[in-house]
Image (spheres, rainbow, N blue to C red):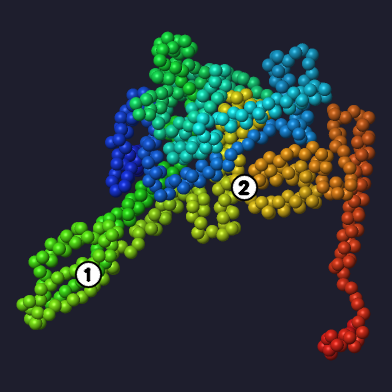
């Protein structure tokens, strides 16, 4: 089978359909509004042609009755719930010092492999070294948290970072591509993110020569090493009206001309070539992967004909009110003949008095002349309805409903998230939300979080925190609260672990409580049993304390056993008191007065 046979719907035909965007009651070609000149400008700049016209796809979303709600559902549920920063090492946890000790050991192993470890330095850190490193890293973690919060509070000029993410998601789902312009300060640090409309940007081919770039590689949980790698990078061009600007890829160390896209050895050489020119800024590209193009392709493009068909259906139903040509009733006169003035009156009535909602209930009157007939000149008048020939309801309703389901299936969204609330109960609604959260929204959040941690936070030098998108509270708070309460009460969870779960339920971070009772089961606290954290690791405990630790554990076991026996005795006493039947002696006469002769007394 040849490649032409594998493509039953030619790409030229797809481009023609995309460019023929329905506007009102007519078809308008974007090229008639300057789209052809813009395409020529991109070609002159050396840009690659996208698989589908981004501007035409934006217009399709504006005129579609099913695309917008799906795109909004993605933007709201994936990017609309904010974000938080999770610690790489929780310095308030019990195992924080152990993790710091492991981190220090990994750093020394990496230094030994690189040949930078001082001679005579032991790879295994001592307790004093681990404690000193612990205090140092905890202080750095607090400073980094303050930097992150300050940066993301002012990451954009006129809107919040969450709004930037929503705009990015809308562009990504509409055109398959989204772009951020990245601004840096005089020291080269990240300063701002600027939203760039995706339909104004095109990709240039990959540069022929690779460029040496710096990449950060993780050595330990909180330590990165900078390595050099050679990669082929790409430039971008943006055209808005008569203005044209070039951009370079995020992380490109070269000096690129903003006006021509040419590379220069330094800024001074760029200024000497053109004093009005300046270095190009960086562009961060998001895309829905396509195996045949460096551009992204939206997930709904396979339902393009369904989108266009629904638009045509809407126009047919709308134009019925303006072009209705069948009157609701007719007044017929028989036994005579039409007068000479009746025919032009009928023609004028149909052309002038049947269109529009103001003439919806007008009727047609026919005049007849009964003179000269054989029945004495009497004419017969008859009122006949013509509603059977009229359209009673909108056409193609089943077709439109199937098209809407096809578009929703392309996004893999249940009907409830698309604005339809019929045929749902609580069980089906929770199942639909759980499916969308697990199979659609959370993987997209994970992909965005990976890019933020690997590129943005790594470029900022953040070591102790990870970017994490917030999720909606799809679980029943009452049910989850009851479950956590039961698990804490029976000792499966400690109060500290219960507070962590409560933070996940309500999407907020609870204040840390440093008391010892939060770190042991609540049953032990209520029973008055005092516990002590015991570390039996030989490296952490000298041999002389092992016997004492074992003795403490044996004492704790005996206390727990005594507490279990006391609880079992209490349960048996309660069962005997409330569950066992009690025999009461009743006099015979009193018993017969109650029940008569129906039963014999015991």
Task: Locate residue 125, reporting x and y percent.
Answer: 79, 22
Farthest front residue in view: 358
Using the image, tell me which numbered label, if any, was put on residue 215. none
Left or right: where 299 falls relative to 471: left
Q: Nearer the viewer, residue 452 or 272?
A: 272
Circle 2 residue: 473
Residue at the spot x=86%, y=67% of the render? 578
Using the image, tell me which numbered label, if any, was put on residue 330. 1
Relative height, residue 426 to residue 101 (above, below): below
Residue at the spot x=66%, y=27% of the render? 144
Q: Quadrant of residue 598?
A: bottom right
Residue at the spot x=49%, y=44% of the render? 72
The reply to whether residue 460 is visible in this rendering is yes
Q: Secondary structure at mark 1?
A: strand
Task: Locate residue 230, reporting x and y percent.
Answer: 53, 19
Farthest left residue in view: 372
Relative height, residue 536 to residue 421 (above, below): above
The reply to whether residue 206 is visible in this rendering is no
Q: CA distance from mark 1 to mark 2?
A: 62 Å
Q: Quadrant of residue 507?
A: top right
The quarter in which the N terminus is drawn is top left
């Amino acid at each position: 089978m040849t490649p032409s046979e594998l493509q039953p719907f030619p790409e030229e035909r797809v481009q023609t359909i995309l460019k023929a965007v329905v506007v009102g009651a007519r078809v308008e070609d974007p090229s008639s509004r300057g789209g052809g000149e813009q395409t020529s400008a991109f070609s002159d700049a050396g840009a690659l042609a996208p698989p589908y016209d981004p501007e035409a796809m934006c217009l399709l979303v504006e005129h579609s009755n099913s695309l917008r709600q799906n795109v909004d559902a993605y933007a709201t549920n994936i990017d609309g719930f904010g974000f938080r920063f999770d610690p790489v090492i929780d310095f308030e946890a019990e195992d924080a010092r152990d993790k710091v000790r492991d981190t220090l050991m990994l750093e020394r192993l990496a230094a030994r492999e690189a040949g930078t470890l001082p001679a005579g330095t032991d790879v295994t850190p001592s307790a004093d070294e681990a404690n000193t490193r612990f205090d140092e890293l905890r202080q750095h973690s607090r400073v980094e948290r303050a930097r992150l919060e300050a940066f993301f509070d002012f990451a954009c000029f006129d809107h919040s970072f969450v709004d930037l993410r929503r705009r990015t998601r809308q562009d990504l789902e509409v055109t398959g591509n989204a772009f951020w312009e990245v601004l840096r300060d005089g020291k080269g640090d990240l300063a701002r993110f600027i939203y760039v409309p995706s339909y104004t940007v095109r990709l240039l081919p990959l540069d022929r020569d690779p460029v040496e770039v710096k990449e950060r590689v993780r050595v330990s949980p909180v330590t990165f090493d900078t390595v050099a790698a050679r990669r082929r990078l790409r430039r971008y061009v943006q055209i808005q009206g008569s203005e044209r600007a070039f951009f370079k890829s995020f992380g490109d160390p070269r000096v690129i001309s903003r006006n021509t896209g040419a590379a220069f050895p330094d800024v001074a050489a760029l200024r000497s070539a053109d004093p009005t020119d300046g270095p190009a800024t960086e562009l961060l590209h998001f895309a829905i992967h396509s195996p045949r193009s460096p551009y992204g392709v939206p997930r709904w493009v396979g339902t393009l004909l369904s989108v266009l068909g629904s638009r045509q259906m809407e126009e047919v139903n709308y134009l019925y009110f303006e072009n209705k040509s069948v009157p609701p009733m007719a007044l017929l006169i028989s036994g005579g003949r039409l007068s000479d003035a009746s025919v032009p009156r009928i023609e004028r009535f149909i052309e002038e008095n049947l269109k529009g909602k103001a003439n919806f209930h007008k009727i047609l009157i026919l005049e007849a002349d009964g003179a000269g007939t054989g029945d004495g000149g009497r004419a017969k008048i008859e009122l006949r309805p013509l509603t059977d020939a009229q359209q009673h309801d909108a056409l193609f309703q089943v077709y439109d409903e199937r098209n809407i389901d096809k578009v929703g299936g392309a996004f893999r969204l249940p009907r409830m998230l698309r604005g339809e609330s019929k045929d749902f109960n609580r069980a089906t609604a929770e199942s639909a939300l759980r499916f969308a959260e697990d199979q659609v929204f959370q993987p997209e959040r994970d992909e965005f979080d990976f890019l933020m941690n690997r590129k943005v936070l790594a470029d900022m030098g953040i070591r102790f925190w990870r970017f994490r998108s917030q999720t909606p509270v799809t679980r029943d708070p009452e049910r989850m609260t009851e479950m956590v309460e039961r698990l804490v009460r029976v000792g499966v969870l400690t109060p500290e672990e219960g507070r962590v779960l409560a933070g996940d339920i309500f999407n907020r971070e609870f204040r840390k409580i440093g008391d010892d009772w939060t770190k042991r089961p609540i049953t032990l606290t209520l029973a008055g049993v005092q516990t002590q954290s015991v570390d039996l690791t030989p490296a952490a405990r000298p041999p002389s304390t092992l016997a004492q630790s074992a003795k403490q554990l044996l004492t704790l076991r005996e206390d727990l056993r005594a507490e279990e026996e006391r609880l079992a005795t209490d349960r048996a006493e309660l069962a005997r008191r409330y569950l066992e039947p009690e025999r009461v002696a009743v006099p015979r006469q009193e018993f017969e007065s109650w029940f008569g002769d129906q039963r014999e007394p015991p």
